């Protein structure tokens, strides 16, 4: 199947599953793009997601643009036009289901917003969204504070940890400092400034 059609179908599926914001898609992106299709390595995924965080716009849309570009460029061995086309297709297909669903919802919300069916749907979606957000947070920790995914099986069973798995003290300090700064100074300190300060410190000390 043509890579552009695959991109369209894959990101349209992501668009149907994106409840509650872009970070919810992080575990779904990893399951499909990294573990399922092998389009990106875990390190590539982390780097692209970091760039998506720093660029203006919703993270899920930025990520789709970067992922579509990267996948299409790799498929056509460095063809940047193919990459731009892949970026456009991934972005549009991610947004298309949301656009269609929003048009339907806007037409029926007033009539059904207090109905039992709508309340039941939102009751089920809410906890799932929270769970996906927590999983996304753990993935971000694995990509930054540790050198790879946390080997839960080895930790639980008491087996030896993989040699490639290691703790990054400097990243952990940045994580704690950033969290503290945003909680204590959140009203006076923007998220973007924390990201840029962390990037500068990483460039200096690493």
Image (cartoon, helix red, strand yellow):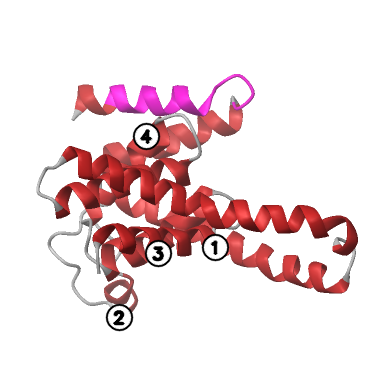
- Mark 3 crowdedness (10 Å alpha carbons): few <14, some 14-19, many ≥20: some
- Examine the rendering and report whether any part of residue 101 can be seen: yes
Q: Nearer the viewer, residue 107 or 44?
A: 107
* Disc nearest the viewer among 3 and 2: 3
Q: Are marks 4 and 2 in contact (CB under 8 Å)?
A: no
Q: Are marks 1 and 4 in contact (CB under 8 Å)?
A: no
The CA distance from mark 1 to mark 4 is 34 Å
Of the image marks 1 and 4, the number of the one nearer the N terminus:
1
Q: Quadrant of the N terminus?
A: bottom left
* Disc nearest the viewer among 3 and 1: 3
* Disc nearest the viewer among 1 and 4: 1
The residue depicted at 22 percent of the width and 77 percent of the height is 159
- Examine the rendering and report whether any part of residue 173 can be seen: no
Residue highlighted by disc 2: 157
* Residue numbers of the magenta segment: 186-201
Residue 100, located in which quarter of the rendered image? bottom right
The CA distance from mark 3 to mark 1 is 11 Å
Of the image marks 3 and 1, the number of the one nearer the N terminus:
3
Residue highlighted by disc 1: 16
SS label for mark 2: helix
Picture coordinates of residue 20, whole percent (x, y):
61, 53
Q: Quadrant of the C terminus?
A: top left
Residue highlighted by disc 3: 9
* Disc nearest the viewer among 4 and 2: 4
SS label for mark 1: helix
As drawn, 138 above or below 201: below
Residue highlighted by disc 4: 174
Q: Nearer the viewer, residue 179 or 124?
A: 124
- Mark 4 crowdedness (10 Å alpha carbons): few <14, some 14-19, many ≥20: some
The residue depicted at 22 percent of the width and 25 percent of the height is 203
The CA distance from mark 3 to mark 4 is 38 Å
């Amino acid at each position: 199947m043509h890579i552009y059609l695959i991109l369209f179908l894959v990101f349209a599926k992501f668009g149907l599953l994106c409840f509650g914001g872009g970070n919810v898609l992080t575990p779904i992106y990893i399951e499909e793009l990294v573990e399922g299709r092998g389009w990106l390595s875990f390190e590539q995924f982390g780097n692209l997601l970091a760039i998506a965080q720093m660029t203006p716009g919703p993270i899920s849309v930025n990520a789709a643009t970067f992922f579509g570009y990267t996948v299409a460029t790799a498929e056509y061995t460095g063809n940047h036009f193919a990459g731009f086309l892949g970026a456009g297709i991934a972005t549009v297909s991610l947004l298309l289901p949301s656009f269609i669903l929003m048009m339907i919802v806007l037409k029926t919300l007033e009539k059904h917003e207090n109905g039992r069916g709508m309340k039941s749907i939102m009751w089920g979606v809410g906890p799932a969204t929270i769970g996906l957000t927590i999983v996304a947070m753990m993935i971000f920790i694995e990509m930054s504070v540790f050198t790879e995914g946390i080997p839960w099986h080895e930790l639980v069973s008491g087996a030896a940890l993989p040699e490639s798995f290691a703790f990054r003290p400097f990243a952990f300090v940045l994580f704690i400092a950033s969290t503290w700064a945003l909680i204590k100074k959140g009203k006076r300190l923007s998220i973007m400034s924390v990201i840029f300060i962390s990037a500068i410190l990483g460039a200096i000390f690493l």
